[in-house]
Image (cartoon, helix red, strand yellow):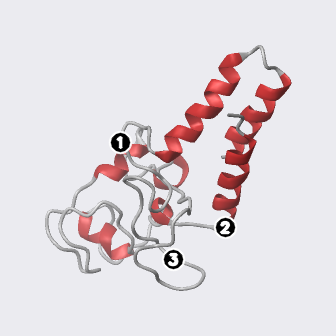
Amino acid sequence: MEKLYILSLAARLHPKQTWIAEAARDQWHWILGRNPNGYSMITRVGKGPDRFYHLEWGPSEPPVPGFLVDGPNAKTVGFLAPGAPAKALLWDNPKPLRSGLPPHSLWHWRESDFWDSGWVADGQSTYGWWAMVECDVLYSANFVLAGASLEP
């Protein structure tokens, strides 16, 4: 989101360089679901997250709308799909998980979901397993800032 904000500011400074504004809009659309997987990174927007790793105010199902989750990235979830972290969203659970998720759930949210999937050994923790569905006020604040900075 920070890059989107910087691109939108650069587009205002250099209006003749239309590629800058296009790059900012592409970033915005990727977050909202125009990406190879077709998944939004915003809760309750399109085919987006319906579970969180944690919430500051406690569990909520479905989650409140408008939160940006961390999502797939090479720094925190590269181990799930080396070289293509966005593919980590595509893993499927053919049977119910011990966390209570039914078969074929998209947004996995408990550490045991990753154990059940075989990503990491049962009982082991690996840095970043939670990143796919962690939300934070900072992420969402950047989302709002970036959206406000885009010109129509």
| Circle 2 residue | 137
Viewer-closest of 124 and 143: 143
Residue indicated by mark 1: 37
- At label 1, the amino acid type is Asn
Q: Is residue 47 visible?
A: yes
Is 12 on the left-hand or right-hand side of 86? Answer: right
* Coordinates of residue 152 in the picture (x, y in percent): 68, 34
Sequence order check, earlier mark of 3 and 2 = 3
SS at mark 1?
loop
Q: Is residue 121 visible?
A: no
The disc at residue 54 is 3
Expressed as whole percent of the image width and height from the top left, the position of residue 9 reads 80, 34
The kind of residue on which mark 3 rests is: His
10 Å crowding of disc 3: few (<14), some (14-19), many (20+)? some
Q: Name the N-terminal-most of marks 2 and 1.
A: 1
Alpha carbons under labels 3 and 2: distance apart: 12 Å
